[in-house]
Image: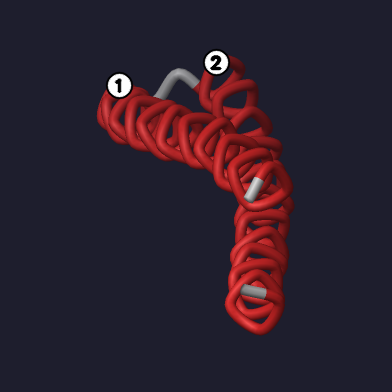
Amino acid sequence: MKTFNHLVSEQMRTMEKLLFLQSELERCEEIEEELNCLVQETELESIQFEIASLRSELKEIHQLFESQTEEVIRSYQNMKVTV
């Protein structure tokens, strides 16, 4: 049970980061749209770089979350088998 609780706790921290990154990505995309309207090329490139970076990090965190989900499921199944 201790392993399962640890895995779930770790997964919740990952979920918090995932949600934070998603909201940051949305914020940056809104800024990108505003800058597109204002045609401020230098700032636009900067925010596009930040968006690309956030998308990459979000993808990594999403993969980590999926991996943790699989590990939580395996742990739970093992816990059921041993009980």
Q: Give the amino acid type for the residue marked by disc 2 in the picture.
A: Glu
Query: Which residue in the protein does label 2 denote?
Result: 43
| Residue under the point 68% across and 32% down | 49
Query: Which residue in the protein does label 1 denote?
Result: 38
Given residues 36 and 4, the one toward you in this image is 4
Nearer the viewer's eye, disc 1 or disc 2? Answer: 2
- Residue 52, image x, y percentages: 65, 43
> Quick one: label 2, few (<14), some, or many (20+) residues within 10 Å?
some
Given residues 57 and 31, the one toward you in this image is 57
Q: Is residue 61 left or right of residue 43?
A: right
In the structure shown, which secondary structural element does the residue marked by tag 1 occupy? Answer: helix
The number of numbered badges drawn on the structure is 2
Does residue 83 sit above or below 44 in this rendering? below
| Residue under the point 62% across and 80% down | 77
Query: Looking at the rendered structure, which numbered label has been put on residue 72?
Result: none
| Residue under the point 27% across and 25% down | 34
Q: Give the amino acid type for the residue marked by disc 1 in the picture.
A: Leu
Which quadrant is the C terminus positioned in?
Answer: bottom right
- Residue 51, image x, y percentages: 57, 37
Tell me which label, 1 or 2, sits earlier in the chain: 1
Does residue 44 sit above or below 52 in this rendering? above
> Quick one: label 1, few (<14), some, or many (20+) residues within 10 Å?
few
Which quadrant holds residue 46? top right
Does residue 20 sit above or below 12 in this rendering? above
Task: Tell me the distance, in whole angstroms, between the alpha carbons under discs 1 and 2.
Answer: 10 Å
Residue contact at pointers 1 and 2, CB within 8 angstroms = no
